[in-house]
Every structure is written in C-alpha cells, then in structure tokens.
Amino acid sequence: MASIPLRLRDHSYDVLIGPGVRTSLPEVVGRLGAGRAVVVSARPREWVPDTGVETLLLPARDGERDKTLATVEALCREFVRFGLTRSDVVVSCGGGTTTDVVGLAAALHHRGVPVVHLPTTLLAQVDAGVGGKTAVNLPEGKNLVGTYWQPSAVLCDTDYLTTLPRRELLNGYGEIARCHFIGAPDLCSLPRAEQIAASVRLKARVVQADERDAGLRHILNYGHTLGHALEKATGFALRHGEGVAVGTVFAGRLAGALGRIGRARVAEHHDVVRSYGLPTAVPSEAGTADLVRLMRHDKKAAGGLTFVLDGPHGAELVHDVPSDVVTHVLTGMPRAPLAALVADDAPPAGRASVATTDPARS
C-alpha cells in the first residue's frame, strides 16, 4: 500500500493506494468523529464498504449526463431528509462523475460537510478523486459550475480496477499519458499501482503549491481544452480520458506550430499517447468550427483561446492563441469515425464487470 500525503495550509489528508484499502473506511470515519454517513455509490452494494456508523446508501450513476445541478440538488435534498449535519460525513464511491457531483453536494450542504472519496475507476484514482475540485456541466460546456472542497481522505482501492471493462481502463490512461508532459514522464512501463501513485504524487505536489488554480495548477489541464470540447461535441460518446488523449496530441502540434517546441517533441506527444493504446485522431463527426467555438468556453480562457502548452520551460498556460493558428492545426489533425477510435466495453476475461452506468443492475 502507498500512502501519499497532501498538505495544504488549512487542510491535510492522505491518499491511500492499494488492494483492499476500501476496508479502511470505518477507521477514517471514526477518526473524523462522524456520527452518521451518507454513502453515494455508483457501484454494486457488495463493493461498498461498511462505514462503521449509521449509514444512508444512495444509488448514483457515473456518466456525464448525470453531472448536473439537478443531481446535486437531489442529493442535497436526501441529505436534508436524513438529517445530515456538519458532524457527519458524505462518502462517494464511483468514478469521476460521482466524485465531482458528490464533492460539490458535500461542499454546498450546510456550507460544507466532510467528504471521503473512494474512486473506483482508473481515471478517478489518478485524477478526479484527488485535489478537491468539484464541478458539474451546463448545456454550454463542461465543468462550468463548481467549487473547491478538499476531501478528508481518498481511498484508491486497486481491487476495483480488476473488474473494469478495457475501455474504462483506457479512459484512465488518458490522464496518465498527459502526465508525461507535466512532470511525470516514462510511466508507461510501470505496474499500474505505481502509475497511479506517480500520478497522484505529481498532482499532490501541484495542488500543494497552487490549490485554487492561481497559476501552476493549470498544467494539470494539459490536453483538456480540446478534450472537453470533443466530449461535448460528441454528446459525451467520446469519454474524458479519450478526449484528453486526443487533446494532448493536439497540444503538441499547436505548441509546434507556435514555435514553442521542435518536431521531435511534437512527435513525442503522438508516440506517448499511442503507447497507451489511446486514440490520436479527432472524431470525423466533430466539426472544426464547432470545436473552436466550444474551446472558447473553456474555464481557463480570459478572453481569447487559451491552452496549456509545452515549451522551453515546460508546460504553461498560454493566453490569446490566434484562432487562425488553432483552426489550421485542428484542420490538419488526422480524422477517423468515432467508432474506429474507441475500444470495446468487454469486461476482463473471467470477471464480471462493475456497473459503470447503472447501479440498479446490482
């Protein structure tokens, strides 16, 4: 088991990574002194650990379509019915959508109640469950409404990953691949648990230096500007990590077009993403003009088009990138039908798949 500390000025917690760490939940709840708990789970009941206290279990669904203010309101109303107070705790058990939505609901209820995350997908373990960002989508774009609410603990149980479909694992590798360009290179050959730990250590360092996106934390959004636009343009048929993978390749090409990096480094973006088996082409169903329009809504933008780009001093936020350059580079990206870019959802051989969209199946 790995234990990675995240220490902030007025709040600290540990991220535990390894098989079976979900069984630490009663100890964590006890340490918080919580009298009761609400567990919001997108996983079958048998995968939800005991909290050690009186608990209300609420079903959830992973997936961007439920990442809405309506879902947050529904959760908060359940908290009220249960009588949840600031002396209690909320627990999320699911993928990135669940950690984001439950984290935001916990931040808003009574202006903040403690939350513990049990991220159950690779993407959530390496990124979404750590760092305190919470957000939901609007029709106009992704993650446009949210706040910062740090968890009291994060339990990354790698046993959850043994049941995920191949495509869901690849979805998480999109976030791991982009780490190569922001401070954690050469992760591809490591065992999965070490890849998770390295990604979390990187994120912890960045968040400790810049909790609220005042500067350095923007590098964690490498590949995300186009990635988010691709998700939205495809009606979320392209998943987050897949979009980030394509966005990472695009970021390399854009940095090259702006003279920030050379040809070899541009090619390295493609090669690293491809080494994880991730898509490197833009879905042919997504039009260039629509993608540029969606990228203008990116929350990092302060006027013009804004991207995190590689350069001589490493990755940094670049404002007011000329739209004609963005359009030219995007037009030059390889294209392929969406169906040809994504892996199938077959479960691992010999294992039953954990539900990723419908907890009622449990």
Image: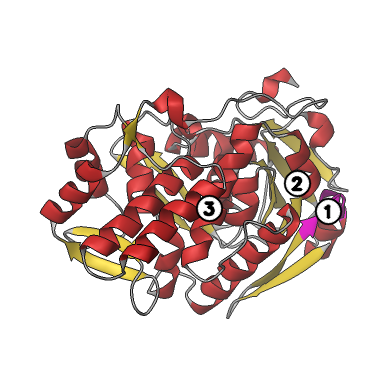
Residue picked out by circle 3:
175
**Label 2 or label 3, whichever comes before in sequence order:** 2
**Hey, what amino acid is under mark 2?**
Ala
Q: CA distance from mark 2 to mark 1?
A: 18 Å
Q: CA distance from mark 2 to mark 3?
A: 31 Å
Crowding at dot 1, Cα within 10 Å, few <14 / some 14-19 / many 20+, comes out as some
Residue at point 43% right, 60% down? 268
Q: Secondary structure at mark 3?
A: helix
Can residue 109 be spotted in the picture?
no
Instruction: Identify the image quadrant of residue 309.
Output: bottom left
Residue picked out by circle 2:
37
**Left or right placement of residue 80 versus residue 247 in this view:** right
- Report the disc number at residue 21: 1
Name the mark nearer the viewer: 2 or 3: 3
Crowding at dot 3, Cα within 10 Å, few <14 / some 14-19 / many 20+, comes out as many
Residue at point 58% right, 41% down? 170
Q: Secondary structure at mark 2?
A: strand
**What are the residue bounds of the magenta stretch?**
17-26
Q: As rendered, which of 173 and 4 lies closer to the eye?
A: 173
Please tell me whether residue 45 belongs to the stretch shown in magenta.
no
**Left or right placement of residue 244 versus residue 327 in this view:** right
Can residue 214 be spotted in the picture?
yes
**Left or right placement of residue 75 versus residue 67 in this view:** right
Eyeballing the image, is 202 above or below 277? below
